Structures are given as structure tokens and as C-alpha cells.
Amino acid sequence: MPRPKVCLIIPAYNESSVIERVIFKVREAFKDTNYSVKIIVVDDGSKDNTAKLASKAGVHTISHLINVGSGGATATGLSYAQQMGYEIAATLDADLQHNPKDVRRGIELMQKGTHDLLIGSRLINNQGMSRAKKNGNKMLSLITYILFGVNVTDSQSGLRIFSKKALNELKWKTSGYEFCSEMLWRAKQQKLRIGEYPIKAIYTDYSKAKGQNNWNAFNIIKSMVQQRFAELIGE
């Protein structure tokens, strides 16, 4: 039996202090599986040594000349996975927030063939998440439902699993954090099967400092509303 080809994508911006640890943890989580795994770091125009350290750690590194945003970096990684013929791809954050074992579990769920896009939800079991972050994520998920009709608990999660069909068909236009909601909208438009599974986010002082704040949520909502109404008018 051929080994399933899996691409693990880590979008990164100024993560030189942790990127080697992230790569090590990912390798440890997948070393005893039957997957053919390739780790990709998409360095989104970092001003530090993120790309150099990722390359030194022996993973394939794609570097943007300028910082284009999380959505753009994710799109670059998924485009690479699609072009190289991977059967499953996964994205995870570069700030040590995600446990790679949760990524592995999501891939195992994807192999059952019942979904095309799986979201690792921090809100199903939100232990350790601050009240402000819980409320901010819930608000963005509610807005995602109101604007786009996609009902998930954690629309902003960076841990996502993609089937081959999703890799071939799923595209979006935004390059900032608002892409998280737009991706779900585009998945719905393509009639992809969307699901969630519980993960436990790891919150450290570093990951809290790197994450979005609730003030940025208003900018995300503004961008989502503008895009939605622009397309409605265009129709």
C-alpha cells in the first residue's frame, strides 16, 4: 500500500525564537506514522532569521519578499501542496499554540472521507482560553454565520485539515486574518463538506503576545462586511 502523502504547512512571521522547536515537535508527532510527510514553512517576509533557521532545520522553506499576511502565506503553502499532488494538507500556527498531535488526529479523521475541510476548534473545549479571547472568537464566528451562513464554533482557528478536493478547489481573495472566515465562505460555495473537531490550544506568554487582539477583530469584521456587500452588489 502506498503511504498517504501529507503536507504540513507552517505560515510564519518573525518566529525565529520558536520555529526550530515547532519543527521538532511536528517531527516527533509524526515519526511513527505510515504517512509520507513533508513539512513546509512559509516565511511571510520576516525581518528576523525565521527562514534561515527553518532551512537549517531541514524543512522546505518558501520565502515571501514582503509580508503579505496570514491569508497570503497560507495560500502559498496550500498552492504548493496542490501542485505537488498531496492527498491531505494541514496548517498550524508557528507560535507553539497548536499541539502537533492534534494535527495528526485531524488527519486521521480526514482519512475517513466524510469531510473536505476540518477545523480544529479551540471553543469546543476552551479550557485555558481567556474570557476576552473566547468572546472575541465567538463574536467572529457569529458574524461569519450571519454574513456567510457557515456555522462553526471557531472560525478563526489556524489549525485546519484539507482534503485533496479542497486543495484543488478552495481559493480566497483576502490576505489578512479575515481569510479565516472567507475560506469557510468559499468552501460553502464550492459545496465542500466542512466539519470541526476539538483541540486544546497551548497558551504561553509568547503565543498570547503573537495572537490577534479583540480590537483587530473589528477590522476583520469591517473587511468581511465590505467584501460580502461588494459581491452582493456585483451579483
Image (cartoon, rainbow, N blue to C red):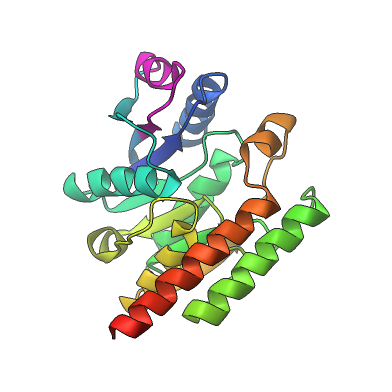
Q: How many marks?
A: 0
Q: Residue furthest right?
A: 131
User: Looking at the picture, does residue 69 appear above or below residue 136?
Assistant: above
Q: Residue at x 38, y 46 (%)?
A: 74
The percent position of residue 191, horizontal first and vertical second, equals 33, 79
Q: Residue at x 77, y 50 (%)?
A: 129
The percent position of residue 52, horizontal first and vertical second, equals 38, 15
Q: Nearer the viewer, residue 204 or 225?
A: 225
Is residue 61 toward the left or the right of residue 53 in the image? left
Magenta span contains residue 66: no
Residue 187 picture quarter? bottom left
The percent position of residue 39, horizontal first and vertical second, equals 36, 33
User: Looking at the picture, does residue 135 appear above or below residue 201?
Assistant: below
Q: Residue at x 56, y 23 (%)?
A: 18
Q: Nearer the viewer, residue 164 or 153?
A: 153
Residues shaded magenta: 40-57
Q: Residue at x 33, y 61 (%)?
A: 172
Is residue 28 toward the left or the right of residue 57 in the image? right
Magenta span contains residue 45: yes
Q: Nearer the viewer, residue 40 or 206?
A: 206
Task: Kindly tell me whether residue 198 is visible in this rendering.
Answer: no
The percent position of residue 34, horizontal first and vertical second, equals 37, 41
Task: Kindly tell me whether residue 50 is visible in this rendering.
Answer: yes
In the picture, the quarter occupied by the C terminus is bottom left
Residue 140 picture quarter? bottom right
